[in-house]
Amino acid sequence: MAGTLVAGVDSSTQSTKVVLCRAEDGAVVGQASAPHPDGTECHPRHWWDALAQVRDLLERADAVAVAAQQHGMVALDGAGEVVRPALLWNDTRSAPQARALVAEHGGPKAWAERTGSVPLASFTVGKLRWMAEHEPGNARRTERVMLPHDWLTWRLGASEPVTDRGDASGTGYWSPATGSYLPELLRAALGHDAEPPRVAAPGEAVGETSWGAAIGPGTGDNMGAALGLGLEPGDVVVSIGTSGTAFAVADSPAADPSGLVAGFADATGRFLPLVCTLNAARILTAAASMTGAGLDELSALALAAEPGAGGLTLLPYLDGERTPDRPGATGVLAGLTTSNATRENIARAAVEALLCSLADAVGHLAAQGVTPRRTLLIGGGARSDAVRALAPAILGTPVTVPEPAEYVALGAARQAAWALAGTPEPPRWPAPPATEHTTDRAADAERIRARYAALRDSAPQI
């Protein structure tokens, strides 16, 4: 495959990013991006328009694949037209509908066993129920339901609407354990039958673009990141982006009746137990706004404070929270006194809160049998010196910080190379350059996490 180029697309909440790579080793030879509108719903045409802005780079590729934000509800009518703007993963309006579906169809244990997850507001199945209740006309018009990456793959030239097992596992009506749809759950949500995309095999070529490039099946963003990082057993990824995620690859499906761990599939035929928090990097941007600092200055302020932030503890559920399931929650800053009300302590409390929330997420994975050997820290928040310095102690493992890169898009590019090669396994690409971080402050971290847990458990369970 020498001289062959492949493109990976990351269609995220905030933007479209494309990387162009050499198929044989993943070396990046070009990249571009275009913004999306902000918000919790978005018409899919904006994703397509953003992709058009980077088309010149895309058309240099011999194969392409799309990884995109999970869960987004793309409802289409019989002519394939979009019925309404897509409800995105971060839209929490369907929390009551998700709870109702769980109660109506066997409870949390039954959902975990059947779908791998107990659906929350982010899941597609709850969004369909919300539309059925609040926009019955749109629900009646809906004949096909897609996810963001499915829709983009179809528009690029897939021979039929397709998805992959990774993204399908976040809908709430597909079973990772059996590899099949659960049409009765889709029908219970929407009020009538609708057609989901075919689930393509990992690495399958599903069509051809207008310029003759092979098309991979695509996947969800977290599955793309796992593929881009080349995860091995014992690796736990903590991603600090718009959302916070902790995930690991596994050989068997997870089924957590507590709903804390989503039992997703991955993009290779394995599984991807995952915990997602609604609040992550925006905790840092909110703290920067509170202190009048830029993000680099916020990091310096946090490192100038003592561990424990002078007694300040932040519960960072600023926009509601997904894990734990508190969609109506707000943030809490506890322990504030005249003596500790400094910019340094507020900055430190924000970084500690972010990492404590993500340490809780890693703990939930461990309860499902994941044994963390090391943590890979990625996402925009991993660029913070304070986050990198505090993470090993609070997360409780050595921390590897791969060189900043578009790992979701790289995973999609690796999948594109796989589809082009037609091999049983994805191509082996070298691990990215990384820095290693350890700590000797475990005792401090234990106290910080204990105080955080006390605030978490005493705050209103909204």
Image (cartoon, rainbow, N blue to C red):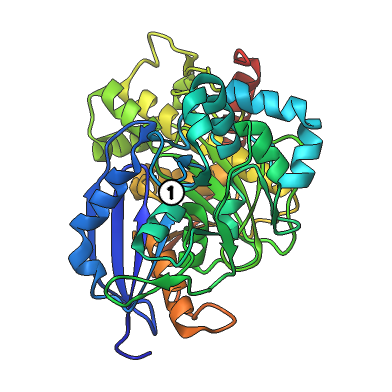
Left or right: where does residue 156 sit relative to residue 182? Answer: left
Left or right: where does residue 164 sit relative to residue 181? Answer: left
Report whether residue 236 is seen: no
Indicate the position of residue 388 as horizontal and vertical percent values.
42, 49
**Residue occupying image coordinates x 69% and y 45%:** 183
Q: Foreground: 152 or 447?
A: 152
Indicate the position of residue 168 as horizontal and vertical percent values.
59, 52
Report whether residue 133 is seen: yes
Quadrant housing residue 251: bottom right
Residue located beneath label 1 in the image: 148
Indicate the position of residue 22 as horizontal and vertical percent values.
33, 80
**Residue occupying image coordinates x 53% and y 17%:** 328
**Residue occupying image coordinates x 30% and y 52%:** 16
Indicate the position of residue 421 as horizontal and vertical percent values.
47, 84
Q: Quadrant of the C terminus?
A: top right
Quadrant housing residue 363: top right
Q: Given the image, on which type of amino acid does mark 1 rest?
A: Pro
Q: Quadrant of the N terminus?
A: bottom left
Density class for disc 1 (Cα within 10 Å; few <14, some 14-19, many ≥20) is: many
Seen from this angle, which residue lies furthest top? 338
Q: Foreground: 413 or 349?
A: 413
Seen from this angle, which residue lies furthest bottom? 2
Q: Is residue 101 above or below residue 391?
A: above
* Helix, strand or loop at mark 1: helix
**Residue occupying image coordinates x 45% and y 41%:** 77
